[in-house]
């Protein structure tokens, strides 16, 4: 289980995300990646160090005030650029970062393949984001509800953050068996797998509990739900 950083607020997300990934380097990792939303949902990822990611994005689009970033410790699929996080859903309208393991990924994947999904990576994570997209499209539910329904079908451990091209003001995150912290700033939110990347910005932190989904929306109060659907 490796590093998660996400940001939403008035500032440029890229420098905050990169600094956050550097703060998490002590955990060890094999690849790094970032997704940012500024009209288009763009993704950049590399095998190797965060410094290699910084070199890789030179001259590329790194604009946006909302974004997600990850350092991966491979469990499903070799350490390479394709398997690095974030991962897109099939329509490329959703992007996910994930710490942990989806134990029943192979039966979920088989089902999705039958439904016409194709996969770019060997990861369990790409299965989860396509499951969420499939539920969203076929059950006609809002994104956080699709996430909640999908997580009820998942066996395993996860801390996830999802960025959606259709929701430029919201990040959805959830956890079970893998930590996730949300820092509440003056007018922004910082999300990370531990408090190290957050403490320089705010002391006001919420540790998400197991089986909770958080809806993190710009200029709104943090909303936390149980994946079992009991609103808090
Ligand atoms: N199971 C995921 C993968 O192999 C996440 C690994 C991690 O926690 O970094 O891509």
Image (spheres, rainbow, N blue to C red):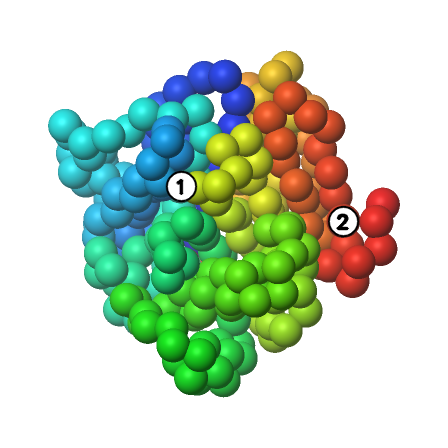
Residue at (65% x, 25% y) in the render:
184
Assign the C terminus to one quadrant of the image: top right
Q: CA distance from mark 2 to mark 1?
A: 23 Å
Which of 20/220 is in front? 220
Asked if residue 119 lies left or right of residue 189, the reply is left
Density class for disc 1 (Cα within 10 Å; few <14, some 14-19, many ≥20) is many
Asked if residue 63 lies left or right of residue 135, the reply is left
Asked if residue 54 lies left or right of residue 147, the reply is left
Q: Position of residue 83 (x, y in %)?
A: 29, 62
* Residue 225 marker: 2
- Would you say residue 131 is visible in this rendering? yes
Q: Position of residue 100 (x, y in %)?
A: 51, 62
* Residue 69 marker: 1
In the rendered image, the vertical position of residue 18 relative to residue 179, given as above or below: above
- Would you say residue 109 is visible in this rendering? no
Q: Position of residue 16 (x, y in %)?
A: 41, 25
Density class for disc 2 (Cα within 10 Å; few <14, some 14-19, many ≥20) is some
Residue at (28% x, 52% y) in the render:
31
| Callout 2 secondary element | strand
Residue mark closest to the camera, 2 vs 1: 2
Residue at (37% x, 68% y) in the render:
123
Q: Earlier in the sequence, mark 2 or mark 1?
A: 1
């Amino acid at each position: 289980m490796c590093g998660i950083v996400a940001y939403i607020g008035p500032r440029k997300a890229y420098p905050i995300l990169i600094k956050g990934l550097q703060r998490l380097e002590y955990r060890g990792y094999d690849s790094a990646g970032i997704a940012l939303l500024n009209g288009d949902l763009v993704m950049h990822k590399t095998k190797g160090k965060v410094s290699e990611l910084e070199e890789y994005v030179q001259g590329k689009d790194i604009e946006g005030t909302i974004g997600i970033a990850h350092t991966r410790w491979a469990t499903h699929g070799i350490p390479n650029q394709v398997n690095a996080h974030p991962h897109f859903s099939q329509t490329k309208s959703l992007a996910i970062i994930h710490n942990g393991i989806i134990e029943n990924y192979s039966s979920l994947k088989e089902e999705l393949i039958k439904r016409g999904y194709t996969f770019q990576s060997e990861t369990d994570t790409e299965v989860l984001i396509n499951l969420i997209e499939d539920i969203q499209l076929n059950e006609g539910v809002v994104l956080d509800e699709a996430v909640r329904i999908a997580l009820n079908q998942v066996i395993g451990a996860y801390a996830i953050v999802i960025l959606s091209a259709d929701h430029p003001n919201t990040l959805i995150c959830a956890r079970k068996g893998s930590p996730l912290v949300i820092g509440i700033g003056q007018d922004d939110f910082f999300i990370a797998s531990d408090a190290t990347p957050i403490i320089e910005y705010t002391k006001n932190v919420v540790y998400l509990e197991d089986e909770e989904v958080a809806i993190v929306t710009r200029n709104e109060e943090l909303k936390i739900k149980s994946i079992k659907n009991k609103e808090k």
